[in-house]
Amino acid sequence: MLLRVERESSYASDLLHSRAYDRLSEIDHHLATELVMGVLRWQSLLDSEIATRSAQPLVKLDLEVLTALRLAVYQMRCLHRIPARAAVDESVELVKLVGKRSAAPFVNAVLRKLAAAATPGCKASRSALDGSSAKDLAANNAHPLWLVERWVRDYGIEATREICRCDQSTPATAIRLRHPAAEELLRAEGMQLASPELLASARKILSGDGAKTVALNNGLCAIQDEASQLVALLVGRAASMLDCCAAPGGKTLALADRNPGAEMAAVELHPHRARVLRKILATEKTKTDGRLRIAVIAADARHLPFRRSFDRVLADVPCSGTGTLARHPEIKWRLKPGDLGDLHDRQREILQAAMKQVSAGGRLIYSTCSLEKEENEHVVERALLQDSSFRLLDCRVELDRLREEGELLWPPASLTRGSYLRTIPGVHPCDGFFAAILERLG
């Protein structure tokens, strides 16, 4: 899995939930998850340790060799139930298994030196040494310095410390309750649930595997981060709706649940993802006695294939994902500063195309799971400069309404920056999301 993440730009969370690894026992799957996610979260710290005992620069090592070293060091430094000798032996056998037998003595020598060295582990002991500068935060919390420097500039040192700490922790699974019986059924199936903090309809699973519950499999609840749920709530209620970048479909389904009987269109760029979404929604339609009316279209959101307009349009655009690093730690090693400009251009094109589909008096919600201004405020501001038929609404007004209706539990004032929704990992109990509400003048 680690090799596929590196070579194929795969996402570890997708691989861990793929059918290819169904053969693993529950215990082995938990261990595989801990190893894969742990190595990705702490990669730079692991590499720093390996470099102190390696006679060769890490850039010259074969990826298989470096990955085996990382796995062993993570086990030695961060896991307490695996003996160091077992971690060393397993990694030596791994490089033999993948045809790198000549590297086995090198791996053995490096790891035995590291096993003999008394070095602070990662996780809590490292986080306690955060420091008071961007450089310290990046080094001690295994983040690229350029990202941490941006966050310190945009959010301040205290918020950045919370972001880094949150990114290095294992996030609880958040769910959206779709049926009044869901919570009772989940508890009956052994799930330990936390009381809601952000949204009345959301819960976090503290223990148990929610993915295998009857409540989830029967559609009584859905796995969805609370910030993602909040964005769907901001869209509101309407007779016609368009979701411009729909897959994997969490927000699409949330919109449909909130707007039963509404006419909806869901657009997805990739045909195979559109097919998967159609299957999911077809199953949901059966469960809801045919009430779902969602047409799924495979198309480029920059060139939407509609001649009609919609009362509500959601543009939850592809983004860097820097607000989701606790769930997708590989992003921080994959993302480069130059990528933000390319993402900005694509996001702006999608937003401008989506604006053309909004009815007079209708609204468009633009959102990302990014912490970066280039993908958020800058996209919205540029689009508004080029189209005077829209105005920016204050998200605080909608959040106040949701609070009054009992759906939002968190104080609205702390969820906004200017007119925008802004959630911050570690500061808020959810992923980092941004949202803006644009209204077409009547």
Image (tube, rainbow, N blue to C red):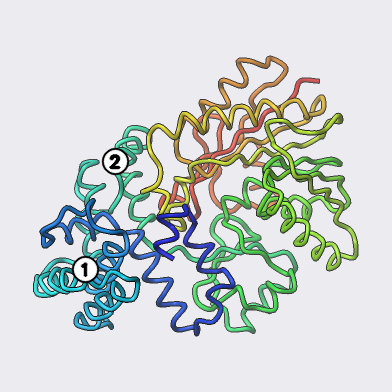
The relative height of residue 95 versus residue 327 in the rendered view (above or below) is: below
Three-letter code for the amino acid on which mark 2 is drawn: Ile
Asked whether disc 1 touches disc 2, contact meaning CB atoms under 8 Å apart, the reply is no
Left-right relation of 118 to 29: left
Viewer-nearest residue: 218 or 192 = 218
Three-letter code for the amino acid on which mark 1 is drawn: Ala
Viewer-nearest residue: 414 or 291 = 291
Circle 1 Cα neighbour tier, 10 Å, few/some/many (<14 / 14–19 / ≥20): some
Percent position of residue 171, x then y: 45, 63
Q: Between disc 1 and disc 2, whose residue precedes?
A: 1
Percent position of residue 414, x then y: 49, 42
Please tell me which residue is depicted at 82% across the width and 34% down the height of the picture.
Answer: 310
Q: Which mark is residue 42?
A: none
Quadrant into which the C terminus falls? top right
Left-right relation of 235 to 193: right
The relative height of residue 200 versus residue 399 in the rendered view (above or below) is: below
The relative height of residue 250 versus residue 376 in the rendered view (above or below) is: below
Q: Which residue is mark 1?
A: 103
Q: Quadrant of residue 353?
A: top right
Secondary structure of the residue carrying numbered label 1: helix
Please tell me which residue is depicted at 84% across the width and 40% down the height of the picture.
Answer: 240
The relative height of residue 369 versus residue 345 in the rendered view (above or below) is: below
Quadrant into which the N terminus falls? bottom left
Viewer-nearest residue: 226 or 138 = 138
Q: Nearer the viewer, mark 1 or mark 2?
A: 1
Percent position of residue 387, x then y: 67, 16
Q: For the residues marked 1 and 2, what is the alpha-carbon distance in whole angstroms? A: 43 Å
Circle 2 Cα neighbour tier, 10 Å, few/some/many (<14 / 14–19 / ≥20): some
Q: Quadrant of residue 297?
A: top right
Q: Which mark is residue 157?
A: 2
